[in-house]
Amino acid sequence: MGEKKKIFSGIQPTNTPHLGNYFTMVNWIKLQEEYDCTYSIVDLHSITVRQDPIKLRAQIKESYALLIAMGLDPEKSTLFVQGHNPNHAELSWILSCYTQFGELSRMTQFKDKSQKHPDNINAGLFTYPILMAADILLYQADLVPVGQDQMQHIELARNIVQRFNGVYGDVFTMPEGYLTKSTAKIMSLQEPTKKMSKSDENPNASVWILDDRDTIIRKFKRAVTDSETEVCAREGKDGIINLMSIYSAASGKSFEEIEAEFKGKGYGDFKLAAGEAVADMLTPMQEEFKRISADKAYLEDCMKKGAEKAYRTTRKTLQKVQKKLGFVVL
């Protein structure tokens, strides 16, 4: 057997993950069996928007514990907090000297976030795609699991690799975006044409993965649908299609099976079943999360070991880069 392909992905510790994040994270768990995986809680990325320090610290720990509770094995995968590995920031500065201003100015997420936070259009908001490239390239990642909205950042990372390798030889692995086919897009329960979002101010729009059973079912009962009564996937039924996607992901049933199950039944029955399926799916993870969160010594030990492993791996890449540039490496 050849060497396993390398995967890198990160999650921002801003608010508890929602259902869309959950299905992305579940895919991470599956990937660790087949690939050499590195997963990071990207705290440095989160401060492009002002954060409450007490809340951020709690959410970093929560995000870390959640990934283990979902089945990520710190022995199989590298799981660490980005800020615990200074190599990320150092490579980011180096790569910023190999990234064109015009490339960054074309990033759609910069434009979107600038509109959302007009009072805080900081330089980090503009340059964070370079830090994202550094995250990926430090680990010589072959694949990066992302949503469609992140593909532009992968293209930037590839441009940087092409530019840097073109000057200095074979230094970085050329990464590719790894798009997950199913459940890649979970939409808002209140505006089903928009993605479910951590920043949505409507409390009924997103299902948080630590919501209790009653809260989950209540949110599904309030989900926006349409004026018809038939549970089926066709044009103009965005709300129902979204609920069918969620129910399918939680239950393993196909759209055809769901349509057959609710033939002749109303939306009320369907919403209740979808809510219950999601609550049943999340319960084991929620119980494991409580257990892990209570064991502070275990969590801290995992964080330290993850940081050490990440540092060792990336130091090799960073020193290779430094030598190519002509720095004096001690």
Image (cartoon, rainbow, N blue to C red):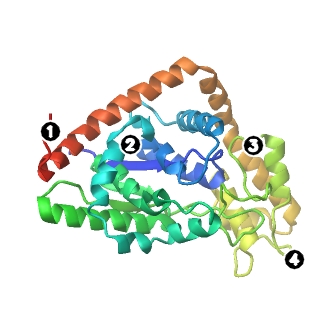
Find out whether the residues at labels 1 and 3 contact each other: C-beta distance under 8 Å. no
Q: Which residue is mark 4?
A: 227
Give percent across and percent down for residue 304.
42, 26
Residue type at numbered disc 1: Val
Observer-side mark, 4 or 3, equals 3
Q: Quadrant of the N terminus?
A: top left
Are there few (<14), some (14-19), or many (20+) residues within 10 Å of tag 1? few
Instruction: Compare marks 1 and 3 and give the one earlier in the sequence.
Output: 3
Q: Quadrant of residue 157?
A: bottom left
Instruction: Compare marks 1 and 2 and give the one earlier in the sequence.
Output: 2
Closest to the observer, 120 or 194:
120
Position of residue 217 relative to residue 53, above or below, is below
Circle 3 sits in a helix, a strand or a loop, which is it? loop
Q: Which residue is mark 3?
A: 211
How many angstroms separate mark 1 from mark 2 (CA)?
Answer: 26 Å
Q: Which residue is mark 1?
A: 329
Residue type at numbered disc 3: Asp
